Image (tube, helix red, strand yellow):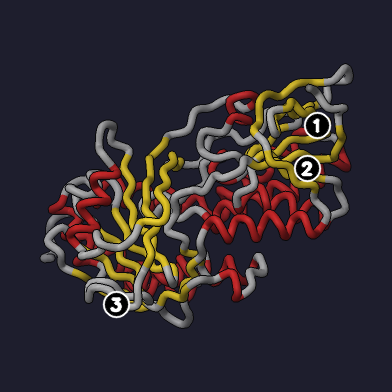
Amino acid sequence: MTHQISRYDVVVVGGGPAGATAAHDLVLAGHTVLLLDRAGRIKPCGGAIPPRLISDFGIPDHVLVARISAARMISPSAVGVDMPVENGYVGMVDRDVFDEYLRERARAAGAARARGRFVALERDAAGAPIVVYEADGETVRAGTQCVIGADGANSAVARAAVPGKPSLVFAYHEIVDVPETVPDTYNPARCDVIYRGSLSPDFYSWIFPHGKTASIGTGSAQKGFSLRQSVARLRAQTGLDSLTTLRREGAPIPLKPLRRWDNGRDVVLAGDAAGVVAPASGEGIYYAMHSGRLVAQAVAVFLETADPRVLKAPRRAFMHAHGRVFRVLSLLQWFWYHSDKRREQFVALCRDRDIQHLTWEAYMHKRMPKRQRSAQFRVFVKDLGHLLGLARS
């Protein structure tokens, strides 16, 4: 059965942080929006969000399930280096609850919500896009002036309209129930990041507290590497293998922003579909929401002007704000994650006070104050010493 075509200013495909943010911003700007999302899809994610995200996007306290005061970087030889959070905390969220909160916030602001699977992009007689999707076994068509593809790393919208192929790493985690009594290796106010080739040959593994639950996961781009077996080993090594597993989730994660986010006409990408996950760290929630906001701003201008050139603005603005950080993190991942010897050196570097300070400053606030250029130079000299083998671990 096919429904009569409904019409909206914008159809957003994908209800994760990027899509929900774009939908919310657009309805607040006075536009009619359909937010289309598949039911039951939860992205594997550590769930950490920095203070900049909380303030920029008005995230209320009740959405946070934990507050993290430190990160522990763990080397291949099990040496742990603690990095206390400076001047605040890192918020932790459960993606199933957090994403639904963002979708409902968009709906409450005025967006229409639909549960369904994107099928195709068609065009009407005037050439305007029609989003075809399946919902409850029926085919539905939604006419629109602009489509935002925020449907993940393997974006069906991107395949249908925007040239380019993403580079992917695969992530897997298990959400476990955390009882009152836990092993000494687990700290409910600390994120553990494990750099060990046997657990991830080219990325890292993690144990992130979520209050009454925890995310235990790993990532790798190496074909044939068993992420599930890796997480099983990590749980056994940390004494967390006896905890009840509540959910298992896996998904591809993009390695770098796509060169092009739009089709030059009326389709633009955001979030994982646009490739906005930070290399080395794997941080994606803030960058997804920032990209969603930038896309919403450009689409609002497009709806007023019908000028498709404005749809190139989000990528330019995003790369201007974050491109340098992404390039540095990509180099960091390429060099330091290459072998366990280098991972050992990398964790040793994390003891340095300058490195800790600049790391938290950049992560928490997404900026690097100019007054700290001398500290940046000291970090550069120390990093260079390790790169050349002149510094001792």
Q: Amino acid at mark 1?
A: Ala
Quadrant in which the N terminus appears: top right
Quadrant in which the C terminus appears: bottom left
Q: Residue at x 72, y 60 (%)?
A: 105
Residue bearing the label numbered 2: 34
Residue 385 figure quarter? bottom left
Mark 1 to mark 3 CA distance (whole Å): 52 Å
Identify whether 190 is placed above or below 17.
below
Residues tagged 2 and 1 counted as in contact (Cβ below 8 A): yes
Mark 2 to mark 1 CA distance (whole Å): 8 Å
Residue 243 figure quarter? bottom left
User: Where's residue 119, x and y in %?
Assistant: 66, 26
Identify whether 62 is placed above or below 315.
below
Position of 230 with respect to 174 (left or right) is left
Dot placed on the residue nearer the N-terminal end, 2 or 1: 2
Instruction: Report the label total.
Output: 3
Residue bearing the label numbered 3: 181
Viewer can see residue 384: no
- SS of the residue under disc 1: strand
Mark 2 to mark 3 CA distance (whole Å): 45 Å
Viewer can see residue 247: yes
Residue 142 numbered mark, or none: 1
Between 167 and 393, the residue placed more toward the observer is 167
